[in-house]
Image (cartoon, rainbow, N blue to C red):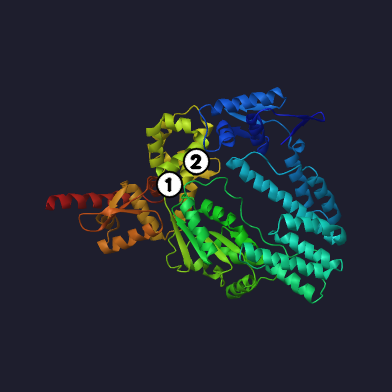
């Protein structure tokens, strides 16, 4: 990293000033909290003077003329993105996407001239390692796009030396090998093209135990048959949303998923309550396994309409109208590829059976609030709340460990009220980070109010109520009606006898209805009652949400009557004793 002013390089003397500057450069024009700067400086092991070191780093940068604005305890780099090389590179690369080949080459050549070495070299905290991977990937993608445009303009002879170097530096990056093979073949050097394929095939077999991608094998066969080859290979779908910045407390689950994918499992089902971090885990697992699926990644958050979009992403321009034909077309397109499919918000196994790969070379990761127990082809990962230590670490990442340590009892109470759910904890952390004047005990008191907890767990685009709404709306009308009665009744612990009175049904029927809510991850089994039947617990936020829905959707008189039956049943039981 280097700073320039008036054509002269400004050398930053200390590690803290370099680190603080780098972290601010990652978010130009945005407020960056002191805790985020501490995280960049010390990763997960801050010293006692960490915050002071950050302030000193800010002071050193200001002495060098760097414009930094302080607002609400956070800092903002007041510098236009066009004078920051990384963001200027990104702007030029974005401009190249829709440009004609000659303009694309010009844009990308200019963009690549701003690179002077590896991204964020010498900065090794988690946030910088993740950002460096992202920026280095952007650079390599820009190189690939520029070479592709050069190939389309007939520059194959001039590209061969550069492509030889790139395939040597990045032997597993198959697109460079495709481009080298195409350039050699179009330059009349078919033997060299075949030799490049052979080297790649041996490298992949030695390091990963896999074969080259279908696109490369197809190009190889075209060369053997001496057929004309296109200037660029078929686009590979890369639909995954961005990788989570950090994931806490799910290492065991990540290892389970990785093992399943490496061993050839065709499906992984991640299930859990609303807000338990299913999406974060699925995306982290998918991003960390991309090398296993070089032919691309498909993603869909609306499983009811997933197939047509996936077919189009795989190059099908004539998607069949009939469902069974779409299923067959997908199996055909996946037959010679290694692709990972991620589908979220699945409501039942039948919804995603058509997407199950027929071959072990492809895999499907799904997330659901339902158990998906009938999906026997899948490795099942069930998520609950985070253990206290992991929940504490999640809060500390944004709030600052010093604030938690100053109020340990209040912190534990907040974690308890959030049921350890990552979404709720992320919201708490965001609210505390933006309100440094709040005591944690203040927030705990607010969360203890069942009429306020859902409104308190909302910040920007994070909203626990919206997450609970999604789960609630997937239930059957009967299940929603029972949940509303439980919410109005207001007891977190509930027995089959109480549900029997609420619903006016037999204990056996009541147990069947309650277990449907257990399957939907809205109730948990808490023990065994004196009658020998299971007792159940309704999580704090689910109880509050159910009561809110009850008051909004049904007459109060109906609930008062149902609760009256429960109380009468309790009194009757006491009288019998």
The answer to whether residue 506 is seen in the rendering is no
Q: Which residue occupies the foreground of this view, 30 or 175?
A: 175
Q: Is residue 530 left or right of residue 470?
A: left
Specify the label residue 427 is tagged with.
2
Residue drawn 41% across and 58% down?
A: 520
Q: Which residue is mark 1?
A: 386
> Secondary structure under badge 2?
helix
Question: Which of the two discs, 2 and 1, labels the residue nearer the N terminus?
Answer: 1
Residue drawn 61% across and 56% down?
A: 240
Q: Which residue occupies the foreground of this view, 411 or 161?
A: 161
Q: Position of residue 152 (x, y in %)?
A: 84, 61
Whether tag 2 and tag 1 are in contact, CB under 8 A, the answer is: no
Q: Is residue 142 above or below residue 403?
A: below
Which dot, 2 or 1, sits closer to the camera?
Answer: 1
Identify the image quadrant of the N terminus.
top right
Q: Is residue 27 above or below residue 310?
A: above
């Amino acid at each position: 990293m280097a700073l320039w002013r008036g054509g002269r390089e400004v050398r930053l003397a200390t590690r803290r000033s370099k680190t603080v500057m780098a972290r601010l450069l990652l978010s130009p024009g945005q407020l960056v909290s002191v805790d985020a700067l501490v995280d960049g400086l010390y990763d997960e092991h801050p010293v006692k003077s960490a915050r002071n070191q950050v302030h000193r780093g800010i002071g050193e940068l200001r002495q060098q003329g760097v414009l930094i604005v302080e607002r609400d305890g956070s800092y903002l780099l007041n510098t236009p993105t066009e004078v920051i090389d990384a963001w200027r590179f990104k702007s030029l690369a974005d401009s190249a996407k829709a440009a004609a080949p000659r303009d694309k080459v010009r844009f990308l050549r200019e963009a690549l001239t701003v690179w002077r070495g590896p991204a964020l070299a010498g900065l090794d905290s988690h946030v910088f390692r993740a950002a460096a991977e992202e920026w280095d990937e952007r650079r390599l993608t820009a190189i690939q796009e520029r070479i592709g445009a050069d190939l389309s303009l007939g520059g194959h002879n001039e590209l061969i030396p550069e492509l030889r170097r790139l395939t040597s530096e990045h032997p597993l990056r198959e697109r460079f090998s495709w481009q080298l093979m195409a350039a050699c073949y179009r330059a009349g050097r078919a033997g060299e093209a075949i030799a490049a394929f052979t080297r790649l095939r041996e490298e992949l077999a030695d390091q990963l135990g896999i074969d080259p991608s279908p696109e490369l094998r197809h190009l190889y066969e075209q060369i053997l048959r001496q057929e004309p080859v296109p200037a660029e290979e078929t686009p590979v779908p890369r639909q995954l949303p961005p990788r989570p910045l950090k994931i806490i407390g799910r290492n065991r689950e990540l290892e389970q998923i990785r093992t399943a994918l490496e061993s050839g499992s065709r499906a992984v089902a991640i299930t859990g309550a609303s807000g338990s971090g299913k999406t974060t885990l699925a995306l982290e697992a998918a991003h960390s396994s991309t090398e296993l699926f070089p032919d691309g990644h498909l993603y869909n958050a609306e499983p009811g309409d997933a197939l047509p979009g996936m077919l189009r992403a795989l190059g099908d321009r004539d998607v069949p109208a009939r469902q069974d034909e779409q299923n067959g077309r997908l199996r055909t397109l996946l037959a010679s590829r290694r692709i990972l499919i991620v589908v979220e918000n699945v409501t039942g196994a039948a919804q995603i059976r058509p997407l199950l790969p027929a071959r072990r070379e492809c895999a499907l990761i799904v997330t659901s609030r339902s158990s998906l127990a009938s999906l026997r082809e899948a490795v099942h990962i069930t998520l609950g709340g985070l253990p206290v230590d992991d929940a504490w670490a999640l809060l500390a990442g944004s709030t600052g460990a010093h604030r938690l340590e100053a109020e340990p009892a209040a912190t534990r109470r907040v974690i308890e009220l959030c049921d350890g759910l990552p979404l709720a904890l992320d919201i708490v952390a965001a609210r505390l980070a933006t309100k440094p004047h709040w005591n944690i005990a203040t927030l705990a008191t607010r969360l203890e109010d069942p009429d306020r907890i859902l409104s308190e767990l909302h910040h920007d685009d994070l909203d626990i109520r919206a997450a609970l709404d999604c789960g609630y709306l997937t239930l059957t009308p009967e299940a929603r009606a029972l949940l509303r009665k439980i919410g109005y009744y207001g007891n977190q612990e509930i027995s089959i006898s109480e549900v029997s009175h609420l619903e006016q049904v037999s204990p056996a029927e009541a147990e069947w209805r309650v277990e449907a809510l257990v399957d939907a991850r809205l109730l948990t089994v808490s023990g065994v009652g004196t009658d020998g039947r299971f007792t159940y617990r309704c999580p704090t936020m689910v109880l509050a949400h159910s009561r809110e829905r009850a008051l909004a959707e049904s007459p109060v008189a109906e609930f008062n009557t149902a609760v009256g039956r429960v109380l009468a049943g309790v009194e009757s039981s006491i009288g019998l004793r």
